[in-house]
Image (tube, coloured by chain):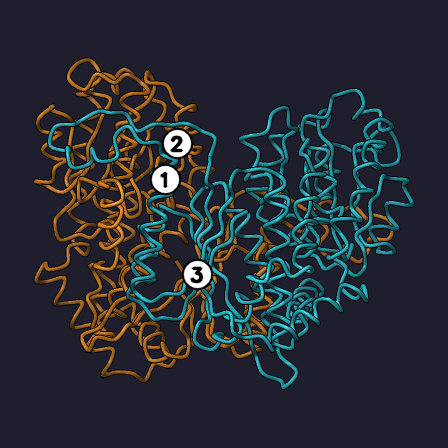
Chain colours: A orange, B cyan
């Protein structure tokens, strides 16, 4: 990955304190995501075993993998799959049951058959109401015999000791654990992402290596651009309250949704002085949103930073034909160019126009779409989130604000 | 549609000035979208004629309609289609070519055949680089004979007198005009939306009637809740800089993107005193984003308003089975309920939790998904945008900020 920015580098005391804090989170194992790139390697071996011992999987009948999970249990996996699936070959198809919307549940059910599907039920807490309700619907829809012949069609991913884990143990279902010290939104490189992605056919070894090497380089102080970016975002957080990712590729839309959760849920907190703090994430897709949001970026309030995310090589050659249409000759300046060139020059042009208007920008580029680069990007954003959280002196890894809604929901059904 | 809010109603002078300004925009015909619900009726008749006279269409071979357009030329149509398509029967399928991403263009091309497709090329200016480049690609990919046998496979929608209009006239292609006084993001009820939606098989008469009746009621002062909401958003625009739509249905995601363009591009402006002003739109999908963005809404900076958008009756009965899973009994409180009930109670619970935390909310409800209700919602948001724009004393209907990027892009190809 290529990371470019011009943020001020002279914030050494802030850098050092945040770096030390992240170092300590990692070394003390208080925060678990730092260990995932190396620890999750063992999962890949366990999955080789699973593929052979699970008779349905071994028979080659599994063509579809249905993931039942919401938020941190699905966003990262979906983001990686969306970016890479058009490139990969011989993949099993991933399907996502996330929402309680009856239309989307019915549509997703209609795409699947019991015969060809492995169902992966993912919930860190083990009792996520969306996930378990949809799981029950799947059991009923496909007539799954949990106690008998369909045991092998179900795989559980949850915290050790959770109610879902106990359920899995009771029925002797295949089960993988999420480490207790890894929060949902930081869990994509745990079993949460590695199990479904490996079973689908992705090179998860490369994914983990991409993350691990970036992590190592960060701790070796070879990626200090992260520190300067984090301190820029923190020091300007009162004025620049919105951090936009402007991704120039449809395939990046779901990875941006992963970023939105990571950033919003981690940094939107009540700080130690009782004050509401946080930075608001937003995600845009280029060039489409040049025709939607760009006007606001250029002329609207100067409350945003913009990170451009691009793919250098789409590996999909598609040339704009050298056709001149009568009266439309002024569009011929792009003739014979690749769309790949056009979309990336559109990004460059948009970035320059923001720069000229004083909007702070930076750029991250995928040299190409592959597992190693996505792994790097994931670790980059997780570290950036931890650094800004450390600078803000907040609890980066919890989400106390969402509990109230759950309690109110429970009462509504009780009454 | 059901509109509910508790914003302060005592802002009479601001209301009246904005109402008068909108009334004047409408009466003077300076702004054209107010006339679309009644004027576009004529399009539906013209399309009856087109369906009979276009021999390919009349033969019944057209199963797919490809829309080539970006921003205001596609977002509204896509939003309406996404909301209604799972309900409608006997529809032709709409496909959208929007972005310059080579992967998505290739994928969309691969879903179509020349035989069964009508291509609708939409560009208000007539020379949108994305649109014309993709049009050339379609001509080349399908070997379209514009001068001969494939003339009837193409339909043009653009401003009268634009380069694309001249192109269409030259080759005698079917053509529909966008009124000069209707901006792209306000054009969904013009030919831009009405032509493809009618040809696909939607009841566009009901769509226009839903918009027209709301417009009439607004001018008759029977929908003054719009005025109080607009003045609330305007008066609090320095503190509440972000206006979130939290839509509880996957099918509403694209309609929210239409809102994002309408709101962001209209209100993000340099005002008459030279100051950058604007309100930032954001869109969320429930219940998914309860697991992503809700923490930030509840505990983060109090810089947001939230409008909940719900569907009362999904017309898709799907019951959570009355299954009790061992160790997971605490999830049984939703057993035997509809997902329809669950998702809407999740919305209510989230709204209440925001209300209790002092975040300003309101709610808009589709009694059911149909054309008339979407028409009403579209007119509601267009009027709300015009009212807030009038209060801000800005040029609501232009977008000067996006020109610079286009010029830079042109230079990049020249060099």
Q: Which of marks 3 and 2 is nearer the N terminus?
A: 2
Question: Residue tagged by mark 2?
Answer: A105
Where does residue A364 sit, x and y in percent of width and height? Answer: 43, 62
Q: What is the spatial separation of the Cα atoms under label 3 and label 2, in whole angstroms?
A: 27 Å
Q: Nearer the viewer, residue B345 or B111?
A: B345
Asked where in the image residue A227 lies, by quadrant, the reply is bottom left
Have a look at marks 3 and 1 and say if they share a chain. yes
Question: Residue tagged by mark 1?
Answer: A99
Chain letter of mark 1 equals A
**Residue A332 visible in the displayed image:** no
Q: Which of marks 3 and 1 is nearer the N terminus?
A: 1
Q: Secondary structure beneath disc 3? A: strand
Q: What is the spatial separation of the Cα atoms under label 3 and label 1, in whole angstroms?
A: 21 Å
Horizontal side, residue A406 vs residue A282: left or right: left
For label 2, the crowd category at 10 Å Cα-Cα, with few meaning under 14, some 14 to 19 and many 20 or more, is: many
Question: Residue tagged by mark 3?
Answer: A282
Chain letter of mark 2 equals A
Q: Which residue lies furthest to the top in this view?
A: A149
Where does residue A20 sit, x and y in percent of width and height? Answer: 16, 73
**Residue A316 visible in the displayed image:** yes
Q: Which of marks 1 and 2 is nearer the N terminus?
A: 1
Contact (CB < 8 A) between labels 1 and 2? Answer: yes
Contact (CB < 8 A) between labels 3 and 2? Answer: no
Have a look at marks 1 and 2 and say if they share a chain. yes
Q: What is the spatial separation of the Cα atoms under label 1 and label 2, in whole angstroms?
A: 7 Å
């Amino acid at each position: 990955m290529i990371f470019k920015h011009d943020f001020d580098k002279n914030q050494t005391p802030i850098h050092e304190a945040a770096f030390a804090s992240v170092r300590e989170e990692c070394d003390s194992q208080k925060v678990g995501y730092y260990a995932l790139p190396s620890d999750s390697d063992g999962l890949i071996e366990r999955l080789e075993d699973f593929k052979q011992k699970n008779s349905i999987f071994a028979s080659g009948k599994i063509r579809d993998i249905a993931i039942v999970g919401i938020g941190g249990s699905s966003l990262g996996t979906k983001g990686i799959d969306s970016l890479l699936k058009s490139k990969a070959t011989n993949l099993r198809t991933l399907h996502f049951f996330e929402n309680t919307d009856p239309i989307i549940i019915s549509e997703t059910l209609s795409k699947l058959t019991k015969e060809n599907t492995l169902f992966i039920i993912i919930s860190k807490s083990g009792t996520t109401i969306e996930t378990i309700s949809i799981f029950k619907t799947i059991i009923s829809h496909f007539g799954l015999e949990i106690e008998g012949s369909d045991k092998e069609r179900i795989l559980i991913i949850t915290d050790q000791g959770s109610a879902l884990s106990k359920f899995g143990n009771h029925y002797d279902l295949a089960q993988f654990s999420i480490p207790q010290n890894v929060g949902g939104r930081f869990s994509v490189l745990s079993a949460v992402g590695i199990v479904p992605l490996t079973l689908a056919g992705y090179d998860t070894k490369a994914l983990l290596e991409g993350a691990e090497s970036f992590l190592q380089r960060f701790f070796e102080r070879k990626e200090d651009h992260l520190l300067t970016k984090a301190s820029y975002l923190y020091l300007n957080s009162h004025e620049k309250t919105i951090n936009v990712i402007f991704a120039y590729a449809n395939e990046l839309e779901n990875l941006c949704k992963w970023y939105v959760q990571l950033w919003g849920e981690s940094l939107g907190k009540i700080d130690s002085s009782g004050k509401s703090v946080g930075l608001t994430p937003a995600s845009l897709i280029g060039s489409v949103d040049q025709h939607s949001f760009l006007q606001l970026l250029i002329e609207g309030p100067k409350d945003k930073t913009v990170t451009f995310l691009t793919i250098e090589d789409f590996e999909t050659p598609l040339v704009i034909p050298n056709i001149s249409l009568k009266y439309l000759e002024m569009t011929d300046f792009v003739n014979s160019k690749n769309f790949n060139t056009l979309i990336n020059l559109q990004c460059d042009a948009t970035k320059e126009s923001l720069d000229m208007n004083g909007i702070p920008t930076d750029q991250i580029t995928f040299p190409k779409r592959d597992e190693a680069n996505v792994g790097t990007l994931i670790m980059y954003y997780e570290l950036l989130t931890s650094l800004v959280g450390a600078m803000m002196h907040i609890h980066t890894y919890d989400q106390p604000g969402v509990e109230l809604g759950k309690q109110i929901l429970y009462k509504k059904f009780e009454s």
